[in-house]
Image: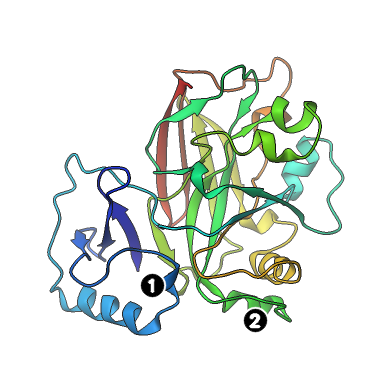
Amino acid sequence: MKLLRVGTAGAEKPALLDAEGVLRDLSGLVDDIDGALLADDAALGRIRAAAESGELPALDPAGLRTGPPLARIGKIVCIGLNYHDHARETGAEPPTEPVIFFKAADTVVGPNDTVLVPRGSVKTDWEVELAVVIGRTARYVESAEAALGHVAGYAVAHDVSEREFQIERGGTWDKGKNCETFNPLGPWLVTADEVAEPQNLSLRLWVNGELKQDGTTAEQIFPVGEVVRYVSQFMTLYPGDVINTGTPAGVALGQPEPKPFLRAGDVVELEIEGLGRQRQELKDA
C-alpha cells in the first residue's frame, strides 16, 4: 500500500493512493498514519480490505498539499557514509561500522514544502536517501534477515545538510543536520510488502533540472537489514521511528571547486524507484 497524509500543515488527514493512482480518504477508518497504526496488523488489514473493495471515497488532489506520510515520528536515526561511491567522492575511508547521528523529528516537512537555507549558510547541500520506517519494536535483533521483519515500509527522504555547520564548526555533525525544514519526507509510505528488494532501488536527484545524483541502494556499505540490526544493539527502535540510510555519490561536497552548494531560488527534485518524487524550492530562513 501507498499511505500518505494530505492537507494543510498540522491538519493533515490520512489517505491512500490506490493501484489505479486514485487518491482515497482513510479518515473514516483511521485517525492518522503513525507508529500505532503501523504496529496494528488488524487496522492495516482493514485498510487493505477497504482499498481492494473500492469502498474508500476518492479525494480530489487538485490544490491539495501532500504532507509527511508519517505523524508523531519518535526519532530519526541517520547513517552517514553508507555508500561506497559517496565515500570515494568525499575521500573518506569506508566505515567498518555504521556511522550514526540523529535528526530531530521537527526537521520533517512535506515532500514539496519549502526548504529554508539557514542564516549564515554558505554550504547547504542535498542528499537523496532511502528512509526506513519501523513498524515493530526492534531490540537486540539477532540477524539482518530478522531485522527486515521489523520494517513497516519505506519512503523518500531528503537529508538536507549544512556542511560548514556539520564539519567545520566543531563538535558533532548534528548542527549541520537539524536546521529547520532539513528533512522533507514522502510523498508516500510504501509498505514493505511492495518493496521486494530494498537493495535494488535507483535514487536520483536534480538541482535546477541538472541531474546530480544517480545511484542505487546496491552501493550501500551496510544494507537495510544490517542497519536495523546494528542500530537495535544500541537503542530500541519503536513503531514510528525512521532510519535515513545514507546517500549515494553526487553531493555538492564531493564536487570540484567551486562546489555548487544550494542557494535561495534553487529547485531540488528527487525520487526513488517505486517510492515517489519530491520537489522543493529553497528560500532564505
Res. 265 image quadrant: top left
Res. 96 image quadrant: bottom right
Q: Is residue 249 left or right of residue 92?
A: left
Q: Is residue 55 left or right of residue 267?
A: left
The residue lying toward the viewer, choosing from 203 and 114, is 114
The label shown at residue 104 is none
Q: Which residue appears at 38% of the width and 36% of the height? A: 113
* Residue 62 x %, y %: 16, 42
* Residue 182 x %, y %: 53, 37
Q: Earlier in the sequence, mark 1 or mark 2?
A: 1
CA gap, disc 1 and disc 2: 21 Å
The label shown at residue 146 is 2
**Callout 1 touching callout 2 (CB < 8 Å):** no
Res. 241 image quadrant: bottom right
Q: Amino acid at mark 2?
A: Ala
- Mark 2 crowd level (few <14, some 14–19, many ≥20, 10 Å Cα): some
Q: Which residue appears at 45% of the width and 27% of the height? A: 209
* Residue 101 x %, y %: 71, 49
- Mark 1 crowd level (few <14, some 14–19, many ≥20, 10 Å Cα): some
Count numbered badges in the picture. 2
Q: Which residue is mark 1?
A: 37
Q: Secondary structure at mark 1?
A: helix
Q: Nearer the viewer, mark 1 or mark 2?
A: 1
Q: Which residue appears at 49% of the width and 65% of the height? A: 240
Q: Secondary structure at mark 2?
A: helix
Q: Which residue appears at 60% of the width and 75% of the height? A: 148
Q: Amino acid at mark 1?
A: Leu
